[in-house]
Amino acid sequence: MNKEQQYEHVALQIKGLIESETDLIANLSNIANLLGEAFSWWWTGFYLVKDKELILGPFRGPVACTRIAFGKGVCGTAWQEKKPIRVKNVNDFPGHIACSAESLSEIVVPILKDNEVQMVLDVDSEMENHFDELDEKYLERICYMIAEKL
């Protein structure tokens, strides 16, 4: 299976998982694990907006940063700008928050409801320049599926 076919397969699995389940944390937990397993990413998870900061939510991977401020790091910047951010090398991103020295590239996709960011999907890789337009396209699609359940 090529990467696009793999995303199509994963998107169908996610749709099936969240169709009948109403609990957000259960759904996010399954999605983080499914994505991480399918693509063997270093870290896959969610940060939820609570009390004007991003708070660590369900994830798959090593221990992570617990809180991220608005506009800080890749996650906080994606929240602030309300758009996906792909980073080829996190060491080149101004203000990058290094939760793990193993992480070299990252993609963050905000999840919006009523034009307000509710959470972000954060994916890290231990390889440089790991994420491309195809990853962004499908992760946005998956995030839209999550937003519809909010």
Image (cartoon, helix red, strand yellow):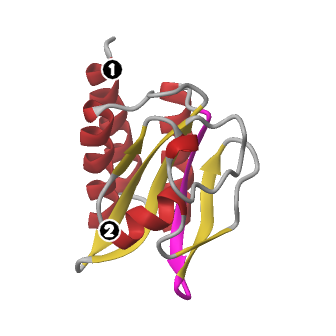
Kindly identify the residue that appears in the image at 26 percent across and 23 percent down: 4
Which region of the structure is painted magenta?
42-52
Classify mark 2: helix, strand or loop: helix
User: Could you say where residue 42 lies in the image, as x and y percent from the top left?
Assistant: 62, 34
Q: Amino acid at mark 1?
A: Lys
Q: How many marks do you count on the picture?
A: 2
Main secondary structure found in the magenta portion: strand
User: Reading the chain from its start, which is encountered first: label 1 or label 2?
Assistant: 1
> Label 1, label 2: how many angstroms apart (C-alpha)?
28 Å
Q: Is residue 150 visible?
A: no
Pointer 2: residues within 10 angstroms few (<14), some, or many (20+)? some
> Can you say whether 46 is above or below 48 in the image?
above
Label annotation for residue 3: 1
User: Could you say where residue 110 lies in the image, as x and y percent from the top left?
Assistant: 36, 62
Classify mark 1: helix, strand or loop: helix
Pointer 1: residues within 10 angstroms few (<14), some, or many (20+)? few
Lateral position of residue 75 relative to residue 149, left or right: right
> Can you say whether 44 is above or below 55 in the image?
above
Question: Which residue is label 2 attached to?
Answer: 81
Looking at this view, is 104 or 147 the one in front? 104
Kindly identify the residue that appears in the image at 33 percent across and 11 percent down: 1
Kindly identify the residue that appears in the image at 28 percent across and 39 percent down: 138
